Amino acid sequence: MMGGPWQDDAAFAFGDLVAAGAIAEQWRRSGTFLLAGLCGPQGSGKSTTAARLVERLGGHGLRAIVCALDDFYLTRSERGSLATKVHPLLATRGVPGTHDLALLGDTISALRSATGDTTILLPIFDKALDDRLDRSDWRVHRGPVDIVILEGWCIGARPQSAAQLAEPLNALERDRDADGVWRRYVNEQLETGYAPLFGTLDFNLLLQPPSFDCVLSWRAEQEAGLSRRAGARAPMTRAELAFFIAHYERLTRWLLLDQPADLIVDLDMRRAPYAWRLGAGSGRHA
């Protein structure tokens, strides 16, 4: 579905109204701290959507903050160690198993219990450097929080079955993971480490693209817009991006099929929302 700029603006405004209203209503039902997930493939607009939702929730009188799963990647050194011990593909950030879940859990717990005089450091991962910044460069949050929006490409994802993992999905898996060690490890991490975290979500929102095929173009636009510090690597070429995205392909395709969300937002090729659907949830209360 395509439209002009004003139609896109209207769609975003309406979409924000729907999503923020649903999150605010969920908060009112609980009357306490709420953890909301925001899931979508690379380049789908999660960060900008999350920022708009924070502003919209402020209009409801709610104090909201964004935590990006990307900021909790293991350091480059930690991933290098994991690549040596488990599988070389784990040097590449992204898949379950390459995040510091202890740091994420501690951060969410601190935000959950924050009071008026609380100061919390929020980590920052620089994608251009492919590493976490020093603590002295982290964001500082002060004060209580009503809602944390946890945004990330695999938020709410559920593990696949052994049968689903049996055959390689793409050339990366065929050539670099012929024995399935990497994809089984990722799946195990999803089941043992990430499932408990996702089980604490009070609400989950999924940005659904037209297909997986548009992810490369979206991610290329994102790559071109990355700010670059001294010492940062050069922007990835389209071929390098395709190889990078292949690491995410299995789980992204599974997410778009499984749709573990309370609210699903269908996007057009320009990332503009055009339909909103109730989902079956993430299964966290099953």
Image (cartoon, rainbow, N blue to C red):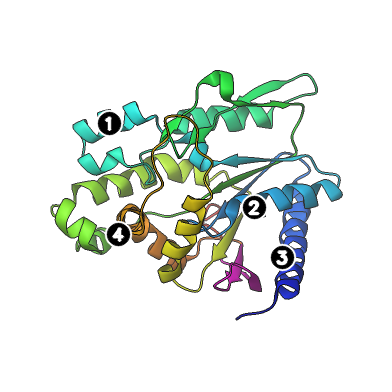
Q: Earlier in the sequence, mark 4 or mark 1?
A: 1
Of the numbered discs 2 and 3, the one sitting upstream in the chain is: 3
Q: Which residue is mark 4?
A: 161
Contact (CB < 8 A) between labels 4 and 2? no
Q: Any mark on residue 48, and which?
A: 2
Using the image, tell me which numbered label, if any, was put on residue 80: 1
Q: Secondary structure at mark 2?
A: helix
Residue tagged 3:
12
Provide residue 186's location: percent of width, then percent of height: 31, 46
What's the residue type where badge 2 is placed? Answer: Thr
Under tag 1, what secondary structure? helix
Cα separation, mark 3 vs mark 1, equals 40 Å
Task: Give the residue displayed 32% in from the left and 42% down from the top.
Answer: 92
In the image, which residues are magenta?
263-280
Give x and y (percent) for residue 102: 47, 29
Q: Quick check: 258 above or below 111?
A: below
